[in-house]
Amino acid sequence: MEKKRFAIAGVGVRGLCFAKAITRQFAHAAELVALYDLNRLRMQGFRELLACEVPSFTDFGTMAREARPTHLIITTPDYTHDELIALAFQAGMEVVCEKPLATEAAKLRRILQLEQAFGRRVVVAFNYRYMPYHTFIKSVMQDNRLGTIHSVNLGWMLDHVHGQEYFRRWHAHMARSGGLLVHKASHHFDLVNWFIDDVPEEIFAWGDLRVYGGKGPFRGERCRTCQHAERCPAAMKTHLQEDAVEIFEKLYWQAESEDRYVRDRCVFRPDIDIYDTMNVMVRYRQGACLNYALNAYSPLAGYRLDITGARGRIEASQEHSGTAMLSERGQDAVQIMTGTNRGDQKCDTITMERDLSEHGGGDVRMYRQLFEGAGDDPQHCAADSRAGVMSCIVGIAANASIRAGRPVRVSEVLGEEEETGGGLRARS
């Protein structure tokens, strides 16, 4: 079988994950033929970390002509995704795009139009779908043990270390990331859409900036030179893991002179305009309702999920890396409760060994499908552009609801024709 030829656009940390997978685990099926980024110093550091010489380009057209990739992996800032998809399609490439697919409804519409015009497709890299814990939950949902789904509750917690990271970087500006309701929560909304196999229709949301931005106790330009570093609770050096220092040095700090991108900006600077506290209500086409909460300053990292149907209920939860001292059980459990009266109630608790590889085992399973080929996919983990649209549009509509102070329909934001005209009814 001829190897797939991959180029990576965006040589940050996530791009490095893809590059290592191609060059080390899946070199038998895929080849990394090019890097594309506007920062030459960052590409140099990327190659050093990868320990592999890969042709590098700052001009997309030159990269496409000389390296001849068949596939492009996009790991650039979220607001650039639609433009890179257009360039890739024009050059005859297929596209793998990191979530979120786009930050605005107009960009989502453009991507769908590009697919139709070029007869090509975008695969969205939803690695959470591939986690064994989540594929098990999906299999229970496919068996219809709960009956018609009426209610979903999902509370997602980012601990201080993880949460602060979004406020140091370009993510801290709504125009570039769509805020955490798009950049981060698109993962979570996709899981719910996928679990219950339904399409969101109406959203009402609240959002606020309560801990970061101008609410913080200190103010500076960046952590590395800040006079408050010894006292500030968000000082980067207090939680930067030793194995990450070299990555930060080579990809960011040594590359600053090229584009002035500062990776350790103060999380309390006043120009931050995204939310750190969010609550969202979503009504789905088939009648289910989702209550969702996200905060970026919890002592605990992880989530709590319950799905309730006419005949039963699932309860699931996870604690994520960094806060494992709060949960030493080393297992993930799912409770499946069924019954319609007190006489026929039953509760099964299923335990699974916790997968400690990247993203709970989701990354390697997703890479296998991307690089080796689809194979069996009984839980429909592979996500297309329509799944990407339906995950993003919840956050985009939620941001619109927060601004307007009222419920917002998906059709209002995405456009009535696109939402009901056939393309977005596909399986999530």
Image (tube, grey):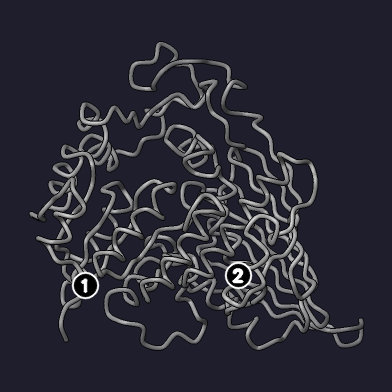
Tag 2's secondary structure? strand
Q: Who is closer to the viewer here, 16 or 161?
A: 16
Q: Amino acid at mark 2?
A: Ala
The residue carrying mark 1 is 26
Residue 65's x, y, as percent? 13, 61
Residue 333 numbered tag: 2
Name the quadrant containing residue 304.
bottom right
Whichever of callouts 1 and 2 sits on the residue coming sooner in the sequence is: 1
Left or right: residue 177 compared with residue 46: right
Residue 409's x, y, as percent? 74, 58
Q: Who is closer to the viewer here, 192 or 200?
A: 200
The quarter of the image holding the C terminus is: bottom right
Front position among marks 1 and 2: 1
Tell me which residue sits at (25%, 29%) in the image. 256
* Disc 1/disc 2 C-alpha distance (Å): 31 Å
Q: Counting other residues with Cα less than 10 Å from the Cα at mark 1, is it few (<14), some (14-19), or many (20 or more)?
A: some
Left or right: residue 413 compared with residue 301: right
Q: Who is closer to the viewer here, 388 or 413?
A: 413
Residue 45's x, y, as percent? 16, 42
The answer to whether residue 127 shows anywhere in this view is no
The mark tally for this picture is: 2
Q: Who is closer to the viewer here, 161 or 411?
A: 411
Residue 99's x, y, as percent? 45, 57
Q: Eyeballing the image, is 326 above or below 418? A: above
Tell me which residue sits at (34%, 16%) in the image. 225
Tag 1's secondary structure? loop
Q: Amino acid at mark 1?
A: Phe
Q: Eyeballing the image, is 384 above or below 182? A: below
Tell me which residue sits at (33%, 21%) in the image. 224
Task: Verify CB contact (< 8 Å) between mark 1 and mark 2.
Answer: no
